[in-house]
Image (tube, rainbow, N blue to C red):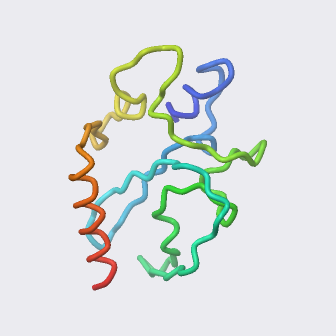
Amino acid sequence: MICSAFHASPPFSSINPAKSRIRVLYRPFDDTYLPVLGGQYTAIECVGKPKYVINEKEYEECAFCPVSCPFRNIFKDPDTGLPLTCDMCANDVVIKEPMCVQWCQSGALVYEEKEIKEIEERETSLEELRQC
């Protein structure tokens, strides 16, 4: 909710969770929450869309992808249809952490700066999990 409020025009004038640049998905098979941020827009659709069934609900793999694309509406502004991209709350106001991290009451969201090598290692680990 804070994300949509921060990005409202003027800031904090409205709250619309559909305009948030972050979604938190629950993965019951390992009891974890997965934050997914709106990423860069791409006009290209993914070719492979494996499906997963979690608690009798079907999900496509792209539900866990941060890319904003024409195929899905998860990160599109409901009023304009334009892609919503997480900008880490970069704005005229200088803040040290994104608003979602600052306002997360459970402490589930953490902002950390990582080296590129650490990110590549994590992506490799995720790819290995997908192949299992």
In depth, the one of 57 and 87 nearer the eye is 87
Q: Identify the residue shown where x is 48% and y is 62%.
A: 65
> Quadrant location of residue 32?
bottom left
Name the quadrant of the C terminus: bottom left
Q: Residue furthest top?
A: 93
Q: Identify the residue shown where x is 65% and y is 20%.
A: 13
In depth, the one of 110 and 58 nearer the eye is 110
The location of residue 21, given as percent across then percent down, is 54, 42
Q: Is residue 17 above or below residue 99?
A: below
The location of residue 58, given as percent across then percent down, is 52, 78
Q: Is residue 65 above or below residue 46?
A: above
> Quadrant location of residue 11?
top right
Q: Identify the residue shown where x is 48% and y is 28%.
A: 89
Q: Residue furthest right?
A: 80
The location of residue 7, given as percent across then percent down, is 59, 28
Q: Residue furthest front?
A: 117
Q: Is residue 109 above or below residue 125?
A: above
